[in-house]
């Protein structure tokens, strides 16, 4: 066989071997990539998802992320997050987590907004938990004090002792650091004139994994001292509540709704 023919065969064989090696290496790389990376839904760069705003397709993107960096309850498909809302901001590059977009967050409905109040401004009369149906009253000041005040504008004073303002649902119970603790007990509220600093003490020490209780555990003992409570109110209810605070102490207590439900 001529040297030229042998050289040609050698070149072709070398090229085929190189091609096979490249294909095999590429295949192994792809296989390794599939095992090391997985899709995850993130907030688009330069964007921020604001609280209570429905998520749109412009807010999120699918990215390949290292498996070790993907959080356990993150979303993997964009269609699973569209239309959902969060009660806290989600920033650019953050993974979207199921616990932040759960449907049981008691988000404000139409014509309502979330309002949170320091517990120095209110007096719970029963144990109340996130999701409980509550009645909101104003317990009036003494008759002598009320004589010096004009008649209320947003509600009618029909009693000398207390007035029912409206009914609603407790949307949140938080500690002084703004962490949801779900449950509020009235045990430290002996008298209305004693509602002060105890609610603003720092949260009691807890283990890192216990810093925020999951919603399904909200009937357990509070993990910290409550400092704020929140309601979803209409504009009229908010104005009524803030005006009533001038006439006395705001009291809240849980009750069963028409369907016999106390809480979610």
Image (cartoon, rainbow, N blue to C red):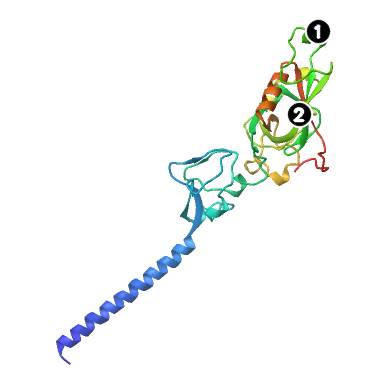
- Residue in view at x 77 percent, y 41 percent: 263
Q: Secondary structure at mark 1?
A: helix
Lateral position of residue 146 relative to residue 19, left or right: right
Across and down, in percent, residue 170 comes to: 72, 35
Residue on which disc 2 sits: 166
Front in this rendered view, residue 218 or 116: 116
Numbered circle sitting on residue 144: 1
Secondary structure beneath label 2: strand
The circle on residue 205 is: none
What count of labels does the image hold? 2
> Is residue 145 in sight in this rendering?
yes
Would residue 120 be seen by someone viewing this image from the given angle?
no
Q: Nearer the viewer, residue 147 or 10?
A: 147
79 with respect to 191 (left or right): left
> Where residue 131 sits in the image (x, y, percent)?
73, 39
What percent of the width, then of the height, locates residue 101? 60, 46
Q: Is residue 202 left or right of residue 90?
A: right
Q: Residue at x 59, y 46 (%)?
A: 84
Circle 1 packing at 10 Å, graded few (<14), some (14-19), many (20+), is: few
Specify the quadrant of the image occupied by residue 167: top right
Q: Position of residue 195 (x, y in %)?
A: 74, 21
N-terminal of the pair, mark 1 or mark 2, is 1
Q: In the rendered view, would you say 45 is above or below 139? A: below
Q: Is residue 177 above or below residue 5?
A: above
| Residue 190 location, quadrant | top right
Given this view, does label 1 or label 2 mark the residue nearer the observer? Answer: 2
Name the image quarter holding the C terminus: top right
Dot 2 crowding, Cα within 10 Å, few <14, some 14–19, many 20+: few
- Specify the quadrant that holds the N terminus: bottom left
**Rounded to the nearest whole Å, what is the CA distance between mark 1 and mark 2?**
26 Å
- Identify the residue at horizontal 37%, vertical 70% (top origin): 25
User: Label 2 near label 1: C-beta < 8 Å?
Assistant: no
């Amino acid at each position: 066989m001529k040297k030229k023919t042998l050289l040609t065969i050698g070149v072709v064989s070398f090229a085929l071997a190189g091609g096979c090696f490249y294909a095999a290496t590429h295949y192994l790389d792809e296989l390794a990539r599939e095992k090391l990376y997985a899709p995850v839904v993130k907030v688009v760069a330069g964007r921020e998802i604001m609280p209570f705003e429905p998520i749109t397709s412009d807010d999120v993107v699918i990215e390949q992320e290292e498996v070790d960096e993907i959080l356990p309850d993150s979303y993997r498909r964009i269609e699973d997050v569209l239309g959902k809302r969060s009660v806290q901001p989600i920033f650019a590059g953050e993974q979207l987590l199921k616990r932040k977009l759960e449907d049981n967050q008691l988000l404000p409905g139409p014509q309502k907004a979330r309002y949170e109040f320091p517990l120095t401004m209110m007096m719970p009369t029963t144990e109340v938990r996130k999701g409980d149906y509550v009645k909101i009253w104003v317990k009036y000041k003494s008759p002598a004090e009320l004589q010096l005040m004009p008649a209320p504008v947003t509600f009618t004073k029909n009693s000398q002792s207390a007035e029912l303002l409206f009914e609603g649902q407790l949307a949140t119970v938080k500690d002084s650091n703004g962490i949801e603790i779900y449950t509020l007990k009235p045990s430290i509220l002996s008298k209305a004139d004693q509602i002060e600093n105890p609610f603003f003490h720092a949260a009691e020490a807890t283990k890192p994994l216990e810093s925020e209780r999951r919603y399904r555990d909200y009937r357990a003992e509070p993990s910290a001292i409550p400092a704020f409570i929140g309601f979803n109110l209409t504009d009229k209810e908010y104005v009524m509540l803030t005006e009533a605070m001038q006439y006395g102490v705001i009291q809240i207590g849980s009750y069963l709704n028409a369907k016999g439900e106390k809480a979610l």
